[in-house]
Amino acid sequence: MAVAFRGALRTAAFCLALTLAAGGGAGAACRDDVIDVRGGDAAARFTIEVARTEETRARGLMFRETLAADHGMLFIFDPPRDVAFWMRNTPLPLDIIYIDLAGAVVRIAENTVPFSETPLPSGATVAAVLEINAGLSRRLGIAPGAQMRHPAFAGAGALWPCGG
């Protein structure tokens, strides 16, 4: 009986987490340390570090050996521009998600090679780049066209505005 109850409780908690991640909760307001993802099969929420300055963008996730599954780093570019990332001094394989000013995913460099210095270009003008653990974008259903909600995409053209 206790095992069945714990299983039901875990299922209910998982459903609640997906609902909140998809923006269905009352706390759907944007926060600087959280990014929400939706679209197609995707519904996820990541706790993030934000890299806004040249120094923090240059360092990124270099030298990090671990990254929690629900964490990432968001690189913000103001003004938006074409960018290229590489994996110099980065021991973690990552998925690098390029995002336009409206909050739409335009490209994903999946399963990047640790320590590689091969440039991974955005292929378009982007306002931000999200780095998460390698394989998560595919596992969570994040693909081009998915939408992100974060204060960085809170302008008039946002596909998924804060509070909405």
Image (cartoon, rainbow, N blue to C red):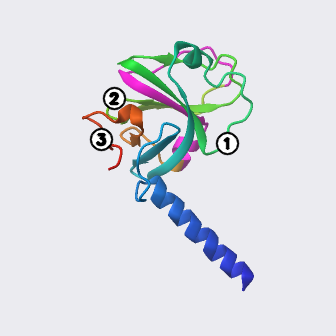
Q: At numbered mark 1, what does the secondary structure look like: helix, strand or loop? A: loop
Q: Amino acid at mark 2?
A: Leu
| Residue name at image x 55 percent, y 18 percent | 57
Mark pair 1, 2: CA separation: 27 Å
Q: Residues within 10 Å of mark 3 (few under 14, many from 20)?
A: some
Identify the mark nearer the N-term, 3 or 2. Answer: 2
**Residue 32, percent from left and from top:** 48, 36
Q: Which mark is residue 101?
A: 2
Identify the mark nearer the N-term, 3 or 1. Answer: 1
**Residue 63, percent from left and from top:** 72, 22
Q: Are marks 3 and 1 in contact (CB under 8 Å)?
A: no
Span colored in magenta: 114-139
Q: Amino acid at mark 3?
A: Leu
Residue 138 visible in the displayed image: yes
Mark pair 3, 1: CA separation: 27 Å
Identify the mark nearer the N-term, 1 or 2. Answer: 1
What is the quadrant of residue 89 in the picture? top right
> Badge 3 is on which residue?
159
> Badge 1 is on which residue?
68
Q: Amino acid at mark 1?
A: Ala
Q: Is residue 141 magenta?
A: no
